[in-house]
Image: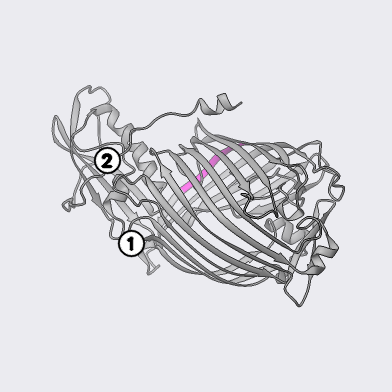
Amino acid sequence: MLAFLFSFLVSFQPAPVLSDSVPAITAYQPYTADSSENRYVEIDNIFIIGNKVTKKKIILREMDVKVGSFYGYKDLKGILDTDKNKIQNLQLFNAVEISVLDLSPVKVDVVVQVKERWYTFPAPIFDLVDRNFNDWWQNRDGDLSRTNYGVKLFRNNFRGRNERLRLTFQLGFTRNFSLSYRIPQIDRSQRHGISFLFDYAENKSIGFRTEDHLQLFLDSEDLLRVERQMGMGYRFRKSFYTTHNVQVLYNDNDVADTIAILNPEYFDEGQSDQRYMQLSYGFTIDKRDFNPYPLKGYRFDFLLNKLGLGVFDDIDQTELKVSLSRHVDVGKQFYFSNYSSVFLSTPRNQAYANFNALGFKKDLIRGYELYLIEANRYYLNRSTFKKRVLSFKERLGLIPIEQFRELPLDIYIKVYFDAGYAENYPDYEQSSLLSDRFLFGTGAGIDIVSYYDTVIRFEYSINRENEAGLFFHLKKEF
């Protein structure tokens, strides 16, 4: 299996770092290459238009074409289309256009025109605590006390270098303060990056046990759990598509004695605190055309996570996850997508607080959104066949902020089939109805893709237990 996955690995020449001293240009001609022409042209210059905040080197880092190189005239458009996707996937721009300005039969200029997004968001928080909207609406009766509120300050593209600063002040179900700062390029080659994280959270209501694949919660006037996490990460982006990530974290968690009594295995052996160091290594190859809602390309992820490095004796756990998503343009506005993942964790006996499960984010079987299927090993495959039925961009002149005036809208109808298997923890009987058996879910739905990578999904699913229902999601499938 690994041999098959790694057959997709290819090497890419790193992009050059070009000078920021690019003169302004106000007019350019669209690229109109005649496919019958076999002549070669030299790139005389690369111009960037519309980047009021973003440094030019951040854009040029994503481009395969470089000044002084020669390309077949009829091949250049395909190369620039790929470069356009890479720039768009920075998620810094509402629109990206790349054109060619013909200077002579043997020389051309490349013109990149971007429309920048709004980068500073003092965004209000109103989040659901539960795993998804359906879990909150049906299992928790839409209880508004199970929500978080507050404010998040996002400063994307900080200093115009694609750096990201995030501050969170949150109240409600979970009181949370967090600070993270990511610097994707710290060297001239723009390959090395670092990040920092601090997170503090406290709860007066927590899930302490699972029965019949439904988590049980305890409410209290006193604090029941306090979690602290801090650490730093290192990122090495060897080529356009390949990234290595290493992260070192310190975790310090405490629960009230009541939780340790109700579930002695919450932190294992009746403990009320848990402290451990964590080391993670992730490897990613991402060749999708548009990351927020891909229609072509693939992404491969490898993650190795070690909880407990011998500094403390509270935990000693190793996790491995491998996943591959493929997206194919079938033609005539039809698309096929497939996502496969394998997760393994050892030792098999683990503390309840460190359990893994099918049912979080993209690792779920549609039709089982209401269930938490805990497992130290699981296998999953998800497939979707869809058709784009509507696509347009409308400029809304009445909106005062330029970055919000252009409204994109794409609508897809789809059918899907998901299947998976979750291996139960040994001697764990609280949730065994759906464990250790083959599960599947199928159905049909509608996807709506709009402002700032927003994805809204309506899906009607039926699972192996012949349970059917309408489910609502606010994120892409995978």
**Residue sitting nearer the eye, 398 or 448:** 448
Mark 1: secondary structure = loop
> Would you say the magenta stretch is mainly helix, strand or loop?
strand
Residue identifier under label 1 = 159
Residue identifier under label 2 = 16
Q: Residue at x 38, y 42 (%)?
A: 86
Residue 450 is labelled as: none
Amino acid type at circle 1 is: Arg
Q: Is residue 453 left or right of residue 34?
A: right
Q: Is 384 inside the magenta-drawn segment?
A: yes
Q: Quadrant of the N terminus?
A: top right
Q: Is 38 inside the magenta-drawn segment?
A: no
Q: Residues within 10 Å of mark 2 (few under 14, many from 20)?
A: some
User: x, y percentage for residue 222?
Assistant: 75, 76
Give the magenta range. 383-391
User: x, y percentage for residue 74?
Assistant: 27, 27
Q: Residues within 10 Å of mark 1 (few under 14, many from 20)?
A: few
